[in-house]
Image (spheres, rainbow, N blue to C red):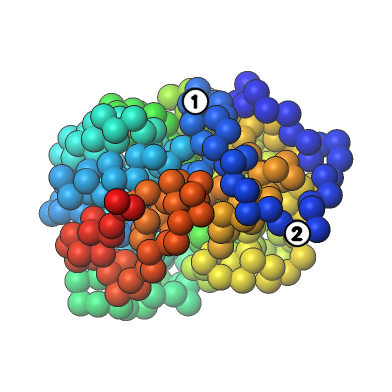
């Protein structure tokens, strides 16, 4: 059982108060998420920061950054490539080499020493890559050989992503095994679990949505076929490390990475329905456009959630008041914060006390050093 909480959305919709409360105490109620006992409902969202060292190895600086944020109920560490082909941007960390596992061990040890919990987001970018980042300078892989209208960041700066080649059917088992091995590596590195990245127009999302998936084999065409890779990856990861240590992130409406679907509600309702029997610890949903418009089109998240009994994490533009409202209404169990956690290492305390938040420096998000990374001040 992923969570001991009842899911009130399965029965009735609670009416929110006329004025959203600024009392955030509901966010500080502990919750069991799969195997993980969390002291609060505040999740640090996975955030790409492009500060891995040569070989895409995490460093002491990365350990300091995460350790500073250990008061989160759960840290979801940044998107991390499961294999060399899974990389799409410069200086993003991996979890496929011994050096990377050793680097991540510094991070998990530091977070655990501060009393925190941390899972790793398992990432394959698919077509959102550039041949200069790929082994042998080859084309990136994707469900279909369709170039995304998207940019990535390489040694020379921002460039258009490369035209991918379609994965062959015979390559899919090895791909799934890369996710399984990455999950095992994450556990070896001391992570409490993993989050399968199936959002934001990266590889699994490219398979899910029909703008990017034009396959005619068992992984394309019908909704059943397009949800097959997601299902098989989550099954393999859960078998490897336990369903209670496995979460998944979905973004039904985002257009990030040039993805779209003709029937998102039917697609994502079925995706969750297929995942439900796996009894994963949590599903983490980006509501609307990633980092943008929360309501680009109508979508019934309660309908999507209905078959799932585990913990439900929502994300995208929440503040303390709206987070408290969504948790107290029962529409979510936890809320993930991205940008506020970059600028506020002690975000939970600030939300509990109603303290002001540090502003975000948009110039230091991607790449660089300690500046804009580990030098945001905590209270006191
Ligand atoms: C990014 O590198 O910009 C990025 C990475 C992972 C995401 C979204 C954005 O899920």
Quarter of the image holding residue 189? top left
The residue at 17%/50% (across/down) is 61
Ligand 1 image-quadrant field: bottom left
Of helix, strand and loop, which one carries label 1? strand
Which residue in the protein does label 2 denote? 19
Q: Nearer the viewer, residue 213 or 65?
A: 65
**Numbered-mark total:** 2
- The picture places residue 2, in percent across and down from the top left corner, at 60, 26
**Is residue 29 positioned above or below 175 on the image?**
above
- Can you tell which mark lies on residue 314? none
Residue for point 27% across, 69% down: 364
Q: Which residue lies most toward the left here?
A: 54
Q: Position of residue 164 (x, y in %)?
A: 41, 65
Report whether residue 214 is seen.
Answer: no
Q: Which residue is mark 1?
A: 37
Q: CA distance from mark 2 to mark 1?
A: 31 Å
Mark 1, Cα crowd under 10 Å, few <14 / some 14-19 / many 20+, is: some
Q: Residue at x 61, y 71 (%)?
A: 293
Could you say whether the residue bearing mark 2 is in a helix, strand or loop?
loop
Q: Quadrant of residue 374?
A: bottom left
Percent position (x, y) of residue 263? 74, 61
Judged left or right of residue 100, residue 164 is: right
């Amino acid at each position: 059982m992923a969570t001991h909480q009842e899911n009130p959305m399965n029965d009735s919709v609670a009416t929110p108060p006329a004025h959203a409360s600024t009392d955030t105490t509901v966010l500080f109620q502990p919750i069991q998420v799969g195997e993980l006992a969390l002291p609060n409902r505040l999740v640090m969202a996975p955030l790409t920061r492009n500060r891995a060292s040569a070989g895409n190895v995490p460093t002491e600086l990365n350990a300091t950054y995460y350790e500073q944020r250990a008061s989160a109920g759960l840290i979801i560490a940044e998107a991390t490539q499961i294999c060399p082909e899974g990389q799409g941007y410069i200086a993003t960390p991996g979890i496929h080499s011994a050096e990377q596992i050793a680097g991540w061990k510094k991070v998990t040890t530091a977070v655990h020493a501060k009393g925190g919990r941390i899972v790793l987001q398992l990432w394959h970018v698919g077509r959102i890559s550039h041949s200069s980042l790929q082994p042998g300078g080859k084309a990136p892989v994707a469900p279909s050989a369709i170039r995304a209208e998207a940019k990535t960041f390489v040694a020379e700066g921002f460039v258009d992503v490369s035209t991918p080649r379609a994965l062959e059917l015979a390559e899919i088992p090895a791909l799934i095994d890369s996710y399984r091995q990455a999950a095992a590596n994450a556990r070896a590195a001391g992570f409490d679990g993993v989050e399968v990245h199936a959002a934001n127009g990266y590889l699994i999302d490219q398979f899910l949505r029909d703008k990017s998936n034009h396959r005619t084999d068992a992984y394309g065409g019908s909704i059943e076929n397009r949800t097959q890779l997601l299902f098989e990856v989550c099954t393999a990861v859960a078998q490897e490390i336990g369903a209670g240590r496995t979460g998944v992130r979905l973004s039904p409406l985002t257009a990030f990475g040039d993805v779209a679907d003709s029937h998102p509600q039917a697609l994502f309702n079925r995706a969750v329905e297929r995942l439900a029997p796996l009894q994963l610890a949590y599903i983490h949903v980006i509501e609307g456009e990633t980092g943008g418009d929360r309501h680009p089109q109508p979508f019934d998240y309660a309908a999507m959630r209905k078959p799932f009994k585990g913990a439900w994490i929502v994300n995208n533009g929440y503040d303390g008041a709206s987070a408290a409202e969504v948790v107290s209404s029962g529409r979510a169990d936890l809320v993930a914060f991205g940008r506020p956690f970059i600028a506020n290492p002690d975000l939970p305390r600030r939300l509990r006390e109603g303290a002001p938040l540090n502003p975000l420096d948009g110039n230091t998000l991607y790449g660089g050093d300690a500046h804009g990374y580990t030098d945001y001040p905590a209270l006191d």
